[in-house]
Image: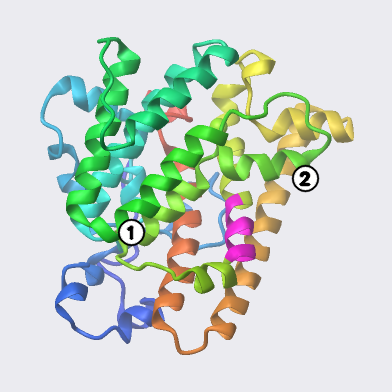
């Protein structure tokens, strides 16, 4: 499959406004902003996003982050024919930060698959243990697969703090609250709205959002975060439902009590066939994306003149666009592409 790229790098007129007006300070130079590549989404016919999709300049170095074949196998979760998930969702992130975030979230992904294999009651206990391992002074003892992952998390939190003491706490907090809440409810949802609210947390949106800020080296103040809150929730809904659309290929074969997916919820609520429920889900995603764009414009209006906020709003759109594009062609959800 060939990679269809619009241009080797973003033309000046296509660059986000915050980028063209960014001052050349020592920190912005290291963001490596100018070399992200815009991807033509028509190369993936099932991709429905209304947001732009770009790829990080570091794409080719990704495979070299971890040299051993075993670790590379663990890393396969985020692989894709057009680039790694994080290279596509955080195309403007600082290189070293995107790399560390990639390692951490990949590990979470492996852990997520692991948690799927243990009963719900036991899973809550394991989540609590891993959450504890994020505390810098707690290390676990027993050498099992679970404790290996817990040990990795412990190391990650230390590396985050070493790289950026100030910004690390918000990222670590997002990881902790994910582990606390992610499995807190599963099964019978009243309707798709109730399900979608849970899915915002469960899909890991707040982790992606906090790492996005960290990777871009922007840190929203509590007041700025408050202004963005509705915008964020809307983006989280789009992200969660987008994952459901593309991962349904794989999840439809899972036992019903293990499914975190909108398709069965919609099917039941509206008494639809599976095929019609998928069509409905596509419409919902577009609706949430449009709402997100509208709220993004409002945030920009409210914070007129703030390059930081313009950067944040644009980055959120690229994260949603990247999530949709990557999901539409990644081997993880698209077996036929993997076997091509
Ligand atoms: Mg899924």
- Which residue is at the front of the view, 51 or 141? 141
Instruction: Say few, some or many: other residues with alpha carbon within 10 Å of mark 1 (under 14 / 14 to 19 / 20 or more).
Output: many
| Residue of label 2 | 193
- Residue at 69%, 43% (x, y): give it: 196
Q: Position of residue 115 (x, y in %)?
A: 47, 19
Q: Secondary structure at mark 2?
A: helix
Q: Secondary structure at mark 1?
A: helix
User: Which image quarter: residue 240?
Assistant: top right
Q: Which residues are magenta?
A: 229-236
In the drawing, does residue 268 fall left or right of residue 97?
right
Q: Is residue 56 magenta?
A: no
Name the residue beneath numbered marker 1: 214
Q: Is mark 1 within 8 Å of ligand 1?
A: no
The foreground one among 176 and 205 is 176
Q: Quadrant of residue 145?
A: top left
Image vertical order of residue 165 relative to residue 202, above or below:
below
Residue 313 located left or right of residue 290:
left
**Which of the pair 139/204 is nearer the observer?**
139
At 59% from the left edge and 15% from the top edge, which residue is drawn? 120
Question: What residue do we see at 30% from left, 38% from top?
Answer: 104
Magenta stretch, main secondary structure, is helix
> Seen from this angle, which residue lies furthest right?
271
In the displayed structure image, the side of residue 106 where residue 161 appears, left or right: left
In the rendered structure, are the residues bearing label 2 and label 1 in contact, judged by CB atoms less than 8 Å apart?
no
Q: Name the mark nearer the viewer: 2 or 1.
A: 1
Q: Earlier in the sequence, mark 2 or mark 1?
A: 2
């Amino acid at each position: 499959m060939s990679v269809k790229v619009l241009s080797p790098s973003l033309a000046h007129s296509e660059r986000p406004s915050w980028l063209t007006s960014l001052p050349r300070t020592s920190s912005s130079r290291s963001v490596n902003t100018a070399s992200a590549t815009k991807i033509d989404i028509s190369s993936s016919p099932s991709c429905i996003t209304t947001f732009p999709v770009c790829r990080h300049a570091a794409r080719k170095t990704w495979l070299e982050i971890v040299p051993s074949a075993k670790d590379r196998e663990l890393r396969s979760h985020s692989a894709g024919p057009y680039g790694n998930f994080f290279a596509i969702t955080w195309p403007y992130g600082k290189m070293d930060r995107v790399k560390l975030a990639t390692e951490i979230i990949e590990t979470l992904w492996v852990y997520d698959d692991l948690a799927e294999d243990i009963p719900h009651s036991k899973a809550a206990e394991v989540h609590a243990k891993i959450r504890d391992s994020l505390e810098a002074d707690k290390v676990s003892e027993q050498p099992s697969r679970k404790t290996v992952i817990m040990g990795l998390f412990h190391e990650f939190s230390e590396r985050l703090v070493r790289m950026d003491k100030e910004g690390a706490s918000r990222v670590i907090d997002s990881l902790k609250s994910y582990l606390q809440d992610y499995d807190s409810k599963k099964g019978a949802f009243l309707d798709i709205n109730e399900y979608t609210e849970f899915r915002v947390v469960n899909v890991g949106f707040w982790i992606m959002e906090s790492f996005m800020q960290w990777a871009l080296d922007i840190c929203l103040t509590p007041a700025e975060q408050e202004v963005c809150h509705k915008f964020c929730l809307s983006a989280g809904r789009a992200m969660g439902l987008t994952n459901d659309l593309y991962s349904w290929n794989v999840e439809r074969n899972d036992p019903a009590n293990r499914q975190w997916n909108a398709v069965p919820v919609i099917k039941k609520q509206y008494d639809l066939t599976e095929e019609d429920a998928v069509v409905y889900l596509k419409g919902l995603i577009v609706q949430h994306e449009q709402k997100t764009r509208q709220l993004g414009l409002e945030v920009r209006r409210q914070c007129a003149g703030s390059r930081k906020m313009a950067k944040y709003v644009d980055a959120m759109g690229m994260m949603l666009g990247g999530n949709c594009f990557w999901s539409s062609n990644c081997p993880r959800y698209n077996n036929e592409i993997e076997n091509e």
